[in-house]
Amino acid sequence: MTNTSQAHDTPEQSPEFDQRDFRNALGHFGTGVTVITTVDQSGQTYGVTVSSFNSVSLSPPLVLWSQVKAAPSHQAFIQSPYFVVNILAESQKDISNHFAKPNDDKFKGIAHHLSPEGIPILEGTLGHFICKKENDVEGGDHLIFIGRVMSYSYNTAEDTAPLFFWKGKYHSAADHIS
Ligand SMILES: Cc1cc2nc3c(=O)[nH]c(=O)nc-3n(C[C@H](O)[C@H](O)[C@H](O)COP(=O)(O)O)c2cc1C
């Protein structure tokens, strides 16, 4: 097998650190796609497409995600005590693209209902987690949000595949290896 990997220095070793190339390297880690939603004190709702979601702890039940500090919705996520993680299905590529762009009324025309806290829960997803913010942690140009899952729900239909993101593109994750 041909070895196609290439070594690159990180900034400490190289002044010519190439951010684009670093992103390409990170993109080799395939992920699912979520839309994370919240609401502010005035009732304004927010939703952002996020691939940095992950599980943290079973006891207590903790999850995390990170948000770039420059995002227009960042202050809302800092201030709100709650967020909801919506796991996108393979059929929801358009939803992913929709929530990845700034928009004053992101939920117009998007099927959803509200959690008891008033946070949008998207329809047609593989599941969602309603979280209370436990902590946030500095992470360079991102802030890492850690949430305690208060309640969750998931789709039990076995044939519903997740939306999969790898090397900057959406892929089908329907096939599995055993
Ligand atoms: C597949 C995908 C994954 C993304 N993951 C993240 C992420 O983990 N964290 C983040 O801050 N932005 C992420 N983004 C970018 C945000 O979705 C984008 O900046 C969005 O416009 C933010 O919403 P806002 O403009 O309403 O603040 C991702 C975008 C895409 C398409």
Image (cartoon, helix red, strand yellow):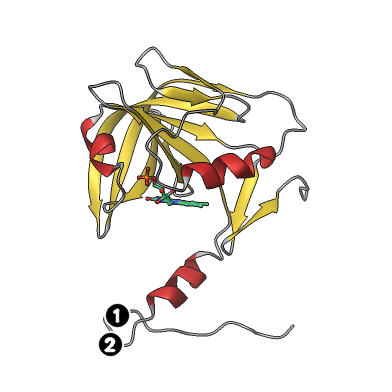
Label 1 is placed on what type of residue?
A: Pro
In the displayed structure image, the side of residue 168 where residue 140 appears, left or right: left
Is residue 33 in sight in this rendering?
no
Mark 2: is the Cβ under 8 angstroms from ligand 1? no
On the image, the x and y values in percent for residue 35 come to: 48, 38
Q: Is mark 1 on a helix, strand or loop?
A: loop
In the displayed structure image, the side of residue 161 where residue 52 appears, left or right: left
Label 2 is placed on what type of residue?
A: Pro
On the image, the x and y values in percent for residue 176 come to: 76, 48
Q: Residue, x 29% and y 86% (percent of image)?
A: 13
On the image, the x and y values in percent for residue 139 come to: 26, 55
Q: Residue, x 26% and y 35% (percent of image)?
A: 76
Among the 4 quarters of the image, the one containing residue 136: top left
Q: In this figure, which residue is indicated by the disc labeled 1?
A: 11
Which residue is at the front of the view, 6 or 72? Answer: 72
On the image, the x and y values in percent for residue 115 come to: 42, 16
Residue 43 in the image: above or below residue 87: above
Residue 13 in the image: above or below residue 146: below
Residues packed near mark 2 inside 10 Å, few (<14), some (14 to 19) or many (20 plus): few
Among the 4 quarters of the image, the one containing residue 10: bottom left
Which residue is at the front of the view, 18 or 131? Answer: 18
Instruction: Point out which mark residue 15 bears.
Output: 2
Among the 4 quarters of the image, the one containing residue 48: top left
How far apart marks 2 and 1 lie (CA) works out to 6 Å
Check the image and name the residue furthest to the top.
116
Q: What element carries label 2?
A: loop
Is residue 122 in sight in this rendering?
yes
